[in-house]
Image (spheres, grey):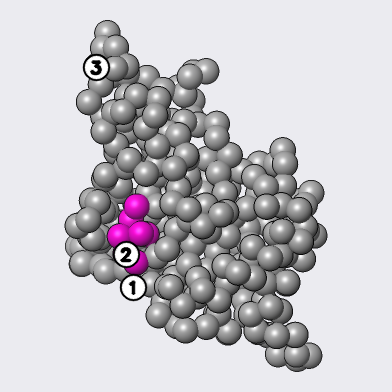
Amino acid sequence: MLIAEGLGASGCVVLPSGIEPEEAELRIIVDPIDGTRGLMYQKRSAWILTGVAPNKGSATTLADIELAIQTEIPLVKQYLCDSFWATVGLGVGGERLNRLTGTTTPLAPRPSQAPTISQGYGGLARYFPGRRALLAAIDDAVIEKVLGPATPGRALAFEDQYISTAGQLYGLMMGQDRWFADLRPLLGPVLCSHPYDLCTELIAREAGVIVTDERGRPLAAPLDVTTDLAWIGYANVTIRDQVEPALRAALAEHGLL
C-alpha cells in the first residue's frame, strides 16, 4: 500500500492493482519533495522521504516504520548532496554524492553533544503569518528559563527557520541544531506537518536524536496524509533535560497543553 498526497481522496493506492488492502505486505509512506518552496526559490535543499512499515491495517503508525530513506535534492549550484537510511536497531548508513564526479563517500551523522543550548541553534517552527507572535513568545520564555534574561548586545542562542521537516531533522542529526519544536497543531486550524513529513524520523532516532510528540512520547501518528502532527527533537539527553520542562511550562501557561 502506497501512501502519499495526490493519490485521490483516500491518499493511498494498493499495488499491484486488484490486491485488497489487507493482502498488502507493506505500507510505504512517501513525501516526494519535502521543502518544495525553498527549493523552488533555490534557497535550501529539499528531501525525498520514504518510510516502510509492515502492514498492520489502519492501526499502522509511524512507530511501526522499520526502514527509512532520506535523500537530499540539492540546489542547482550545489555539487554535494547527502542521503541517509536506517533500519530499526541497526543504526544509520549515509553517503555524500559529488555531482561533478559521480563519486560517493561514506557519511555518518553526529548529533551535537553540547551540554547547553547557549550559543547554539534551536527554537520553534513559526513559518507562516497568523500565530507567529505566540510561538515567538513561547520560544523567548524557554530561552529565558534555560539561559536567563537576554543581555543587551549579546545573543544567547540562534534560530534557523528551515521550511522542511526533513531539513530540521537533518540539522539535528548533523550537529547543526541542538533542539527544535514544531507545535503548530496545538494552535488550532493552521498549516501543519503530517505523517509523510516525519516518515524518516527513524533515521534521526537511530542516529541518537531524541524525537517526541508535544507530551514527550514517541511519535505514533497513523500513516495517512491528513493527521496534523506536532514533534520535538533534542540533540541529546542533556539538552532535553534543559529544554523540555521549560517548554512544557510555557505551553501550559498559554493553555496549549
Q: CA distance from mark 1 to mark 2?
A: 7 Å
Report which quarter residue 192 is drawn in.
Answer: top right
Mark toward the start of the polypeptide (1 vs 2): 1
The tag on residue 110 is 1
- Left or right: where does residue 104 sit relative to residue 194? left
Q: Earlier in the sequence, mark 3 or mark 2?
A: 3
Provide the major secondary structure of the magenta segment: helix
**Farthest residue, direction top:** 18
Which secondary structure, mark 1?
Answer: loop
Identify the residue at image location x=64%, y=63%.
Answer: 248
What residue is rendered at 47% in x and 44% in y? Answer: 197
Q: Are marks 3 and 2 in contact (CB under 8 Å)?
A: no
- Say whether marks 1 and 2 touch (CB < 8 Å): yes
Q: Which mark is residue 207?
A: 2
For the point 25% across and 21% down, the residue is 24
Q: Which residue is mark 3?
A: 23
The magenta stretch spans residue 140: no
Using the image, determine if residue 34 lies above or below residue 84: above
Could you tell me the amino acid type at mark 3? Glu
Residues shaded magenta: 202-208
Which mark is first along the chain, 3 or 1? 3
**Mark 2 belongs to which amino acid?**
Ala
